[in-house]
Image (cartoon, rainbow, N blue to C red):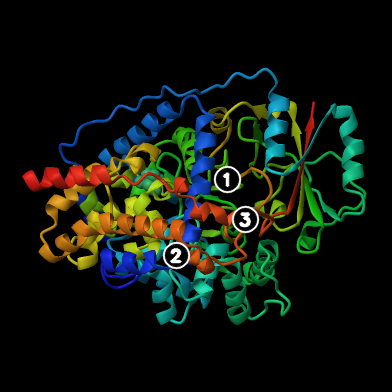
Amino acid sequence: MSARKEILDKVRKAVEGAPEVEIPRDYRTTIPHDDLVAHFAERVDDYRAIVHVLPSAEVPALVAKVTEGRRMIVPEGVTLAVAQVVPEDELLTADGVLTGCAVAIAETGTIVLDAGPDQGRRALTLVPDYHLCVVRADQIVSGVPEAVARLDPSRPLTWISGPSATSDIELNRVEGVHGPRTLEVIVST
Amino acid sequence: MSVFIGMPGDFPANSAKAVQNSQLRFNLRKATHTIRGKRATVVGELPDWAELRAAGKAIKDHTLRHLDRYLVQLEEAVQRAGGQVHWARDAAEANRIVTDLVRQTGETEVVKVKSMATQEIGLNEHLAEHGITAYETDLAELIVQLGDDFPSHILVPAIHRNRSEIREIFLAKMGDAPADLTDEPAALAEAARLHLRERFLRSKVAISGANFMIAETGTCVVLESEGNGRMCLTLPETLISVVGIEKLLPTWRDLEVFLQLLPRSSTGERMNPYTSTWTGSTEGQTFHLVLLDNGRTNVLADEVGRQALRCIRCSACLNVCPVYERAGGHAYGSVYPGPIGAILTPQLRGLGSDLDASLPYASTLCGACFEVCPVAIDIPEVLVDLRAKVAHPRAERAGMRVAGWVLAKEVRLAKAQRLASRFRKLVPKRLPGPLSAWTDTRDLPDIPKESFREWWARNERA
Ligand code: SF4
């Protein structure tokens, strides 16, 4: 007998006659919040990421400023300009990457990437040591349920909450093990 | 389950050794109390925690009730998305499948993301026997692997090691560790970063587990902190994920519950730094999913015990357990330590050995584990049920004593500390935090002697 059939048969036998289970969904699926942008910024800051909130007209100047002197990878869907752009095949030696995002979550200070045109393939935001992410205010949702509803599971998703970190040595938090050591987030309002 | 991981002997003997290890006890106490506090804070932030927990429990129970249907649905979805699905009845079969898959790539090295399922089946050892070297990439797993050691905590597997031990392990075993390596955590993490970076870029094959699989979409989900998971999931040409059949969730939407329950229960964070989801073959990668039974269908057949399959491996129950805190993870003799290990291991492996028969007694039945469990597993209920099934008089006698003994030893130690400071000499000087906490018995958690006695009395009568 194949392993597949044997396992499925064993499962069927094991649960035979077991009661049906209703799933109560009494938890909050929306979490109303007066100021989503401020809430998001505060929660991102909690992870020791750098965060700025400013009007969209001022974003290009800030992007130029914070990327100065850095050799940046910029996926093709990004409309913002940086001084020194390096091609994707120089991923290993690039100083940083500039991306947009798919969704951001205020409650948890999370940005979610879905490998869209302004984010590129997953390795781009992983290998360089610096990740600059520009979030539009209308991309921020209040909580996890709204984010899950907005996302497309057929795309590869990366949920990012602060910089890479470990607490494996005596529970001391150390930022930046394998992912970017610095995460900088600009919220464009 | 044929692979034996951990110490030989039984729980009483193992924990007796552990209780005498002051370093282990100090580290464990610090770790469990720190995480416990963080968890309580972030759980307290959510006014709907009870509702999330009820939903999490019900989603898991519903999935288990229809596990056959959802497994088939998952298989179809993964295949539709270009992935290949394999089924493994037991550890030997899973190891064989993975080894063959690696061989087909022609590679002799693989990188690994921390995965309890592959530890459970002893995959690294099996690969080694077949000439394939598996490199653990999680920092703690790396420490454990280089130190030729066993994990002692689900979440912080190297919690029994302090920084100077880790430095020594790196210097002795890492090969490329800088000669002037200090024992600063940041320096140690940096050494691991450099050590592994080149390996990530070079490796063609990665092996992972998964925290969740979504039947509806065929999506796999991995939560992590360091980015080693992303490296393994993203960079290699071939990805092989070994996942227990109970890790299934029916719908994409169900993640809205578990992505709230797991990080907060586990690391005590609102969200862990990185969560990756992928569906089938992604960005040109070859993807294999190995579905593992290895005793899970036996657990499923047990009306009381099957709730253990709801476990999402958050480790919250370890961090509140007075017995775990004193005995340490190694005493449980399996990859699943603490309260969940005490109910899961004997069910997966059967009650045949002394160790497994003694595990249901590695508890005072104080109930703290049940209270913190994000999927409301009634661990005391399962323990009592398993105790009734143990038909091994020697283990029973030994086991009866163990929880009480471990706790009594703690009280004796505490008294000794109050009377004399000699014990302080055993505490490494470099450990942070006020050492005075050690001599302050008010810091010791309440020792739930009563519930143990009550249970004992009840069973004596029965
Ligand atoms: S039994 Fe519950 S508390 Fe313990 S690890 Fe599993 S899910 Fe977490």
Left or right, residue A88 beside residue B41 = right
Dot 2: within a 10 Å radius of its alpha carbon, few (fewer than 14), some, or many (20 or more) residues?
A: many
Mark 3–mark 1 Cα distance, whole angstroms, equals 16 Å
Please, which residue is most extreme toward the left here?
Answer: B462
Left or right, residue B95 beside residue B40 = left
Q: Position of residue B30 (x, y in %)?
A: 51, 54
Q: Secondary structure at mark 3?
A: loop
Q: Position of residue B55 (x, y in %)?
A: 38, 30
Residue shown at 58% from the left, 63% from the top: B139
Q: Position of residue A93 (x, y in %)?
A: 80, 63
Res. A172 mark: 3
Res. B272 mark: 1
Report in which chain the residue with disc 2 lies: B
Q: Secondary structure at mark 2?
A: loop
Of circles 2 and 3, which is in front?
Answer: 3
Q: Say which quarter of the image contains residue B165.
A: bottom right
Q: Nearer the viewer, residue B115 or B76?
A: B115
Left or right, residue B444 beside residue A104 = left
Residue type highlighted by circle 2? Pro
Q: Is mark 1 within 8 Å of ligand 1?
A: no
Same chain letter for marks 3 and 1: no
Residue type highlighted by circle 1? Asn
* Residue that mark 2 sits on: B151
Q: How many marks can you see?
A: 3
Q: Nearer the viewer, residue B400 or B274?
A: B400
Looking at the picture, does residue B399 appear above or below residue B166?
Answer: above
Of circles 3 and 1, which is in front?
Answer: 3
